[in-house]
Image (spheres, rainbow, N blue to C red):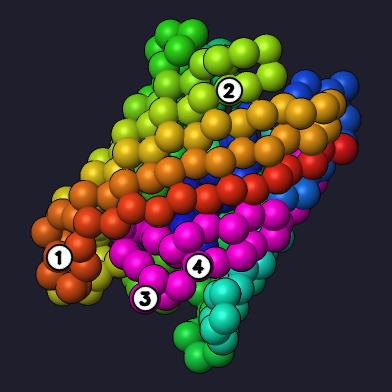
Amino acid sequence: MSLRVIVTLLSLPAPLFAAGLQGSLQTQWQSQYISEGRDNLDGSSLYSVGGDLVMADIAAGVWQAWEAGGDYRENTLYAEYAPYFGEWNPYLNVSYLQFHPQDPDDVEVGIGVSRRLTTLIRLALDSTWSKQASGRFYALSAIAETPLWETVIVDLRLTQTYDDGYASEAYDGLNNLEAGLQLTWNAIEGLSFYAGWQHSWAGEDVRRDGGQDESWGQIGVMGYF
């Protein structure tokens, strides 16, 4: 589970609730399991379920995914601290990951910050460190969010990434450029449906690993309480 999975789970458009303990449950299907610009399952699709609890600036959650028609499983436990300082939103998270059937467990630490530039656009800088890989991965994103209708939100993003020993041991440098589109429908209070599409242009880091340009999509549903 990459840092961007956690960031996505914790930043999907949500209805506003009263202060106090809040939570969400989410399930998703994606056509391919692409992370860091690489196809992790040789074209197979991925199902996942996740949930979190949030109190003020602190969140904790679990995420589980499995390969469609295959043996791959991935389990993640994570905790995050994400305060707001005016237009600035820094965060720090720690994740424990299990990969089945044979890859070793991992511990990852993510740190980043986002800032809203206008009512439409914000910038985000994300980074993660992997204990197993002893490397880091960075992502710089421009994100535009706007309502299309009263209950439908569109999210557009463009992300440039940089690998420093996280995804590849053989090469450090520009990894991939990724563009994405997501539509979220807040159907009723506490229930949202979403669908998205992404395209990744492989950089030198991905190509040296035998990767290529990739396109994939996802659909999902999220409930809030």
Q: Position of residue 95 (x, y in %)?
A: 58, 61
Above or below 71: residue 3: above
- Residue labelled with disc 4: 45
List the residue tagged with mark 3.
42
The label on residue 207 is: 1
Amino acid carrying mark 2 in the image: Ile
Q: Is 77 on the left or on the right of 125, as rendered? A: right
Q: Quadrant of the C terminus?
A: top right
Q: CA distance from mark 1 to mark 2?
A: 34 Å
For the residues labelled 4 and 2, the Cα–Cα distance comes to 25 Å
Reply yes or no: does residue 222 show up in magenta. Answer: no
- Mark 4–mark 3 Cα distance, whole angstroms, equals 9 Å
Q: Would you name the residue on which mark 2 appears?
A: 153
Boundaries of the magenta span: 27-56
**Amino acid under disc 4:** Ser
User: From this viewpoint, which residue is outermost toward the top?
Assistant: 119
Measure the C-alpha gap from mark 2 to mark 3: 32 Å
Magenta stretch: dominant secondary structure: strand
Quadrant housing residue 189: top right
- Helix, strand or loop status at disc 4: loop
Residue 75 lies, in percent from the top left, at 63, 71
Q: Percent position (x, y) of residue 32?
A: 44, 63
